[in-house]
Image: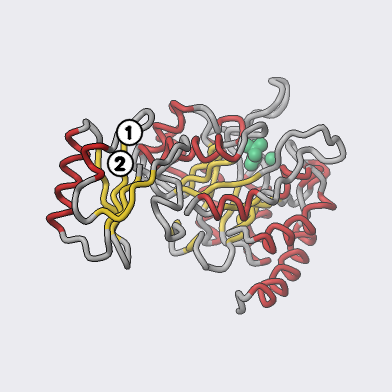
Amino acid sequence: MLIVMEHNADPEQIEKVKKAVSALGLRAEPIPGSERTAIGVLGNRGWVDDATIRGLPGIREILHVSKPYKLVSRDFHPRTTVVRVKGIAIGGGERPVILAGPCAIESEGQVLAAAHAVKKAGAQILRGGAFKPRTGPHTFQGMGLEGLKILRRAGDEVGMPVITEVMRIEQLDQVCQYADILQVGARNMQNFDLLKEVGKLRHPVMLKRGMCASIEEFLAAAEYILAEGNSDLMLCERGIRTFEQATRNTLDLSVVPIIQELSHLPILVDPSHATGRRALVPVMSKAALVAGAHGLIIEVHPAPESALCDGAQSLTPEGFSSLMGEISQLYEYLGFPG
Ligand code: PEP
Ligand code: MN
């Protein structure tokens, strides 16, 4: 429930509303705005009977939010969140941010080659998986801790923050030690225990949409992280399962404007996992930016033909560099010059 106060409501009236909310055993969280204060009500499991609140002075309206999320909602937080990672701003009206690098960390040489290439082409954040959620157990599962160290060294060498996936609660300490952004992957979008633990941290997070998750489920999963206090969260659309077999997943681009309407969280797009095909990555990258994505996360490998994971969807350094040239032309058109 959201209680919107009149623009001239005084602190005493706000205090009375907070007390009335507490008397119901719920938590009141004032959200000061430029025009008026709103008071978010937290802790309720279902519909809240507002009989003891409704008549209090200074209240303009009471909005009953029946959705399974509240903190991620724009009703609750009208201004778009900007997540800051080592001076890079993701979200809001900022220029979109490009995250790029290999699917999996395979060796120091491979990550360094990728890091130098994506940095030179203009990417701002380096990606690379050390813990890989693979479909079958007989495939490369990632380098683990050694991979995290390689990623950190490569990021430091080229001066880029790094993002990597965390699959289990027990990995959180290590991943936080080496990575600037934690990635919660599609397969873990509804690993609620992991989401809660990630929510207790003060470390930026990128939550990917589950391959069979509705937008409402996606936002409800994000709510778990915000509800524990971590508000440095960005979302990522990475394609969903449909009947279509021509692409690895179906890129649901309409999610971008829909999430922007429903939520204040930044929304990024992963055209690599969404399509599974290198040739489709550039056009879908540009389409995502036109749709309003706050950033892209793109797989780039120095030698995709010998990649241990996702080579078919990985751009070559040359391919990435030429895409970045096209993106910078697109920025002019989208109103993000220079
Ligand atoms: C990845 O980014 O490497 C990855 C495994 O993505 P997803 O969780 O979207 O499948
Ligand atoms: Mn991958």
Name the quadrant containing residue 26: top left
> Which amino acid type is marked by label 2?
Val
In the image, residue 44 above or below residue 80 = above
Instruction: Decide if residue 85 is in sight here.
Output: no
Q: In screen coordinates, is 13 left or right of 39?
A: left
Asked if the residue under mark 2 is in contact with the one under mark 1, i.e. CB atoms within 8 Å, the reply is: yes
244 relative position to 48: left or right: right
Looking at the picture, tell me which residue is in the foreground, 87 or 72.
72
Residue 301 makes an appearance in the image? yes
Q: Which residue is mark 1?
A: 48
1 or 2: tag closer to the N-terminus: 2
Q: Which mark is residue 89?
A: none
Quarter containing the C terminus: bottom right
Instruction: Give the SS element for disc 1.
Output: loop
Looking at this view, name the residue that lies furthest to the right.
246
Tell me the quarter of the picture where residue 213 sits.
top right
Residue at the spot of label 2: 41
Disc 2, SS: strand
